[in-house]
Image (spheres, grey):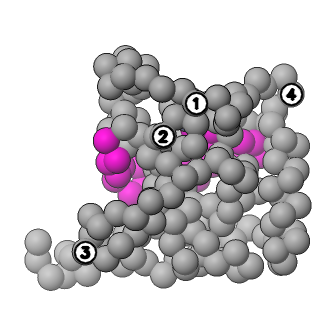
């Protein structure tokens, strides 16, 4: 890779300082964030059945392959990363809930989303208790990757350059998510 190409890649990638654009409803305090977390079901479409995070979904590799689209399988079960700018969910602005494409567990709401400018759907917080984290070293320095607590699916990485007040940026692969519009 030529140096200029690499720099371009770095500027666009998960290394980018990405507080980015934040919509008007951005919470100001951690109390506001907690209110968004507590009220996440307000963004759920009426009558949507959601799975219980305490009931794990365990399937074999073959079963996952049958159940998921190839791109989703690659991210969720093989810890792949989709190409930046390829997910329509990056520009999804409707009210609703982002659920795990593997098991249907609600993970984020539209109120938790912001435009990071990275080309991946980005969130400054999550619905509480839906992820487990671990450290990976795929790009020289350690990153915190997070997995769905119910099916173990890999979703993305969390960085400390998100907007205030959380300062967190959950950089999520769009193919790992299923958007459920509220209406
Ligand atoms: Zn899941």
Q: Is residue 65 visible?
A: no
Mark 3 and mark 1: Cα distance apart in space: 32 Å
Q: Is residue 3 magenta?
A: no
Q: Is mark 2 in CB contact (under 8 Å) with mark 4?
A: no
The crowding category of the residue bearing disc 3, from other C-alpha atoms within 10 Å (few below 14, some 14 to 19, many at least 20), is few
- Work out whether mark 1 precedes mark 2 in sequence or the reverse, and give the earlier one: 1
Counting labels gives: 4
Q: What number is the disc on residue 152?
A: 2
Q: Which region shows up in magenta?
A: 78-100
Q: Quadrant of the N terminus?
A: bottom left
Asked if the beta carbon under badge 1 is closer than 8 A to the nearest atom of ligand 1, the reply is no
Residue nearest the viewer, comparing 165 with 52: 52
Between the C-alphas of marks 1 and 2, the distance is 9 Å
The answer to whether the residue bearing label 2 lies less than 8 angstroms from the nearest atom of ligand 1 is: yes
Which of the two discs, 1 and 4, labels the residue nearer the N terminus?
Answer: 4
Rendering coords of residue 131 (x, y %): 59, 51
Quadrant of the rendered structure where residue 7 is? bottom left
How crowded is the residue under tag 4: few (<14 C-alpha within 10 Å), some, or many (20+)? few
Residue 75, percent from left and from top: 37, 43
Residue, disc 1: 56
State which mark lies toward you, 2 or 4: 2
Residue 69, horizontal then vertical, whole percent: 39, 27
Residue at the spot 74% in from the left edge and 79% down from the top edge: 165
Callout 4 secondary element: loop
Q: Which residue is mark 3?
A: 140
Query: Do callouts 1 and 2 mark residues in contact (Cβ within 8 Å)?
Result: yes
């Amino acid at each position: 890779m030529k140096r200029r190409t690499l720099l371009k890649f770095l500027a666009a990638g998960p290394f980018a300082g990405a507080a980015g654009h934040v919509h008007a409803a951005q919470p100001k305090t951690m109390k506001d964030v907690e209110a968004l977390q507590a009220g996440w079901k307000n963004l759920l479409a009426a009558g949507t059945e959601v799975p219980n995070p305490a009931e794990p979904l365990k399937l074999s590799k073959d079963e996952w392959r049958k159940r998921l689209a190839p791109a989703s399988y690659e991210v969720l079960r093989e810890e792949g990363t989709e190409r930046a700018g390829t997910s329509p969910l990056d520009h999804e602005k409707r009210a609703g809930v982002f659920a795990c494409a593997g098991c249907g567990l609600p993970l984020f709401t539209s109120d938790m989303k912001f435009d990071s400018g990275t080309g991946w759907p980005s969130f400054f917080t999550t619905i509480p208790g839906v992820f487990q984290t671990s450290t990976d070293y795929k790009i020289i320095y350690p990153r915190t990757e997070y997995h769905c607590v119910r099916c173990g699916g890999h979703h993305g990485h969390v960085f400390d350059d998100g907007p205030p007040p959380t300062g967190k940026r959950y950089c999520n692969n769009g193919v790992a998510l299923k958007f459920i519009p509220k209406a």
